[in-house]
Image (cartoon, helix red, strand yellow):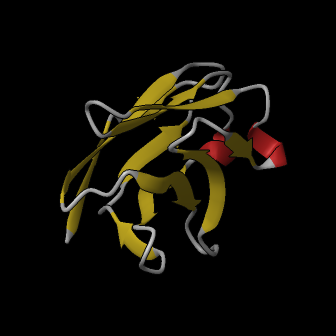
Amino acid sequence: QVQLVESGGGLVQPGGSLRLSCAASGNIFSIYRMSWYRQAPGKQREWVATVTNSGSTNYIDSVKGRFTISRDNAKNMVYLQMNSLKPEDTALYYCNRQQRTPLTDWRDYWGQGTQVTVSS
């Protein structure tokens, strides 16, 4: 099993910044993809960004140029630096880890979420 714990959410004014962190522990494999998802009230959960164990990154169009995902393999951490925040970024942000070994399929793990509220 893998445990994911998010932190760093909070209330910020439009144009402000927050940095989310996600700590992974437990049965960690070296082949992985770590992602951030978010779910706003009344909406479906949406993918925000992904970083792979090799460092490749991808982002949803709405956050490109504002958000940066990064990882620290030694600490089993993933981060989401969020700049120029907008009210529409308000959501519960979830950390997701997919991992596998050369002999197994991808397995999926989720954190409990951290709330980000962008409001004046």
Task: Please state which of residues 28 and 24 is positioned toward the viewer in this rendering.
Answer: 28
Query: Residue 47, how many percent across, how many down?
Result: 64, 60
Query: Residue 25, how many percent across, how many down?
Result: 18, 52
Query: Residue 40, how many percent across, how many down?
Result: 57, 62
Task: Please state which of residues 21 and 56 is positioned toward the viewer in this rendering.
Answer: 56
Task: Please state which of residues 34 and 38 is positioned toward the viewer in this rendering.
Answer: 34
Q: Which quadrant of the figure has residue 82?
A: top right
| Residue at the (59%, 70%) spot, across then down | 45
Locate the C terminus and report the quarter of the image it occupies: top right
37 relative to 49 in the view: left or right:
left
| Residue at the (73%, 45%) spot, across then down | 59
Observer able to see residue 113: yes
| Residue at the (60%, 75%) spot, across then down | 42
Q: Which residue lies furthest to the bottom in this view?
A: 105
User: In this rendering, is residue 39 above or below 75?
Assistant: below
96 relative to 3 in the view: left or right:
right
User: In this rendering, is residue 15 above or below 79?
Assistant: above
